Image: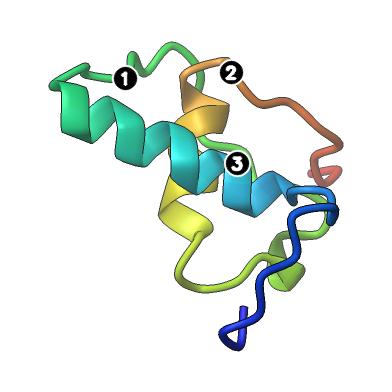
Amino acid sequence: GNNMFAPDRAITREEIAAVFTNYAKATGYKLPTILNATPYADQDLIGSSYKEAVKAMQQAGIMTGQTQQV
């Protein structure tokens, strides 16, 4: 971010979600929706531009993590 190139920095969960969803769109692959959307415990920390990508990865069963207790 901020026009900085950092090749040794670890990629974040939200960044990899965006990469995967953008790749799926570019190749015409429709991500499956096999799980119900469940907010993550750190949902408020996910950047607004990444929320849909993280949700799509979670619903496809590709990305898992701690969810909020309901």
Question: Would you say 70 lies left or right of 51 here?
Answer: right
Residue in the image at 71% along x and 60% along y: 43
Q: What residue type is labelled 1?
A: Leu
Whichever of labels 2 and 3 marks the residue nearer the N terminus, that label is: 3
Q: Residue furthest left?
A: 28
Observer-nearest residue: 52 or 15? 15
Q: Provide the residue designation for mark 1.
A: 31
Q: Looking at the rendering, in which quadrant would you find the C terminus?
A: top right
Q: What residue type is labelled 2?
A: Ile
Which numbered tag is attached to residue 64? none
Observer-nearest residue: 40 or 2? 2
| Position above or below: 56 against 43 | above
User: CA–CA distance between discs 1 and 2?
Assistant: 10 Å
Q: Provide the residue designation for mark 2.
A: 62
Which numbered tag is attached to residue 16? 3
Q: Give percent across and percent down for residue 20.
A: 45, 32
Disc 3 is placed on an element classified as helix
Q: Do the residues labelled 2 and 3 touch (CB within 8 Å)?
A: no
Observer-nearest residue: 39 or 61? 61
Whichever of labels 1 and 2 marks the residue nearer the N terminus, that label is: 1
